[in-house]
Image (cartoon, coloured by chain):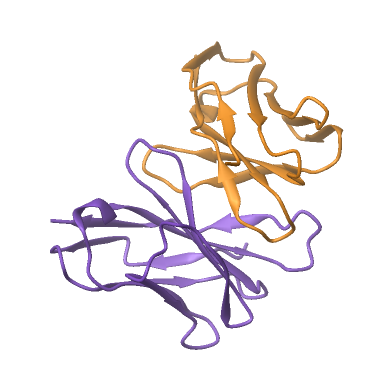
């Protein structure tokens, strides 16, 4: 079974702080990893993808991948109340294959 | 910016009835997916579709489910005889074949309520 595990939270940070979200995966064959943001009652919205070890930055977001430790993380700098949502981590074993989702981490950014 | 669209946004049906959920993937995407999310649970894969045939399906996607690309723009999910446990949000996603990471973009979803 290809599991993706996330701390369900809730994670609560003040506005302007760095939010750190973590994810582990069980399948060493996983090739690509994705972070989605999901507001309550809405669909997953892609934030970032990463498939090489190391860091990938996009604006206030940084994704980190460590394949040896089977660990993926997402850092959100200068957190805003509008970042309050559930963050879903997903893995994929092959290009264009199915996504395996974690249960998500609920983030609250308070003003 | 191109988006995946889905109709209807909410479908209420009685147990045993057939439902068809519709999706219009992003226009230059060639790989399509259906996922579902039962309230409070994780997003689950149902089926992927490429070149007019199913590429992969999960154990959830049994004989009650079918998918079709009836024309050049629509992608549909049919549930032949709905059960109470089919109540969920159903998301369509699409992917551009040539992207290295093959990011999948999700539509807004159809909330299916089976009574």
Residue A95 found in image quarter: bottom right
Relative to B94, residue A28 above or below: above
Say whether residue B106 is left or right of residue A93.
left
Q: Which of B56 and A18 is in front in this view?
A: B56
Q: Residue A28, image x and y in percent?
A: 75, 38
Q: Residue B4, image x and y in percent?
A: 52, 64
Quarter that holds the N terminus of chain B: bottom right
Chain letter, colour purple in render: B
Residue A110 visible in this rendered orientation of the protein: no
Relative to A97, residue A70 above or below: above
Q: Residue B104, image x and y in percent?
A: 63, 56
Q: Which of A14 and B48 is in front in this view?
A: B48
Residue B71 visible in this rendered orientation of the protein: yes
At 49% from the left edge and 33% from the top edge, which residue is drawn?
A103
Q: How many marks?
A: 0
Say whether residue B67 is left or right of residue B80.
right
Q: Which of A99 and A75 is in front in this view?
A: A99
Quarter that holds the C terminus of chain B: bottom left
Colour chain A appears in: orange
At 59% from the left edge and 34% from the top edge, which residue is drawn?
A4
């Amino acid at each position: 079974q290809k599991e993706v595990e996330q701390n369900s939270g809730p994670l609560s940070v003040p506005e302007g702080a760095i939010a750190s979200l973590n994810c582990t995966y069980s399948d060493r064959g996983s090739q690509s990893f994705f972070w989605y943001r999901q507001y309550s009652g809405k669909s997953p919205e892609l934030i970032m993808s990463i498939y090489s070890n190391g860091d990938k930055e996009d604006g206030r977001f940084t994704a980190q991948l460590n394949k040896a430790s089977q660990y993926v993380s997402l850092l959100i700098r200068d957190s805003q109340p509008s970042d309050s949502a559930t963050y879903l981590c997903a893995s994929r074993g092959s290009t264009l294959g199915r996504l395996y989702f974690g249960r998500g981490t609920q983030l609250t950014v308070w003003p | 910016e191109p988006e995946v669209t889905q109709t209807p946004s909410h479908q209420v049906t009685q147990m045993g009835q057939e439902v068809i959920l519709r999706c219009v993937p992003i226009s230059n995407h060639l790989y399509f997916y259906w996922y579902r999310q039962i309230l409070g649970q994780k997003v689950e894969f149902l089926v992927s579709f490429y070149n007019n045939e199913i590429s992969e399906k999960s154990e959830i996607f049994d004989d009650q489910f079918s998918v079709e690309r009836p024309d050049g723009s629509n992608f549909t999910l049919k549930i032949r005889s709905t059960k109470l446990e089919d109540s969920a949000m159903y998301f369509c996603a699409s992917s551009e074949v040539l992207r290295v990471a093959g990011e999948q973009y999700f539509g807004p979803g159809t909330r299916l309520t089976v009574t």
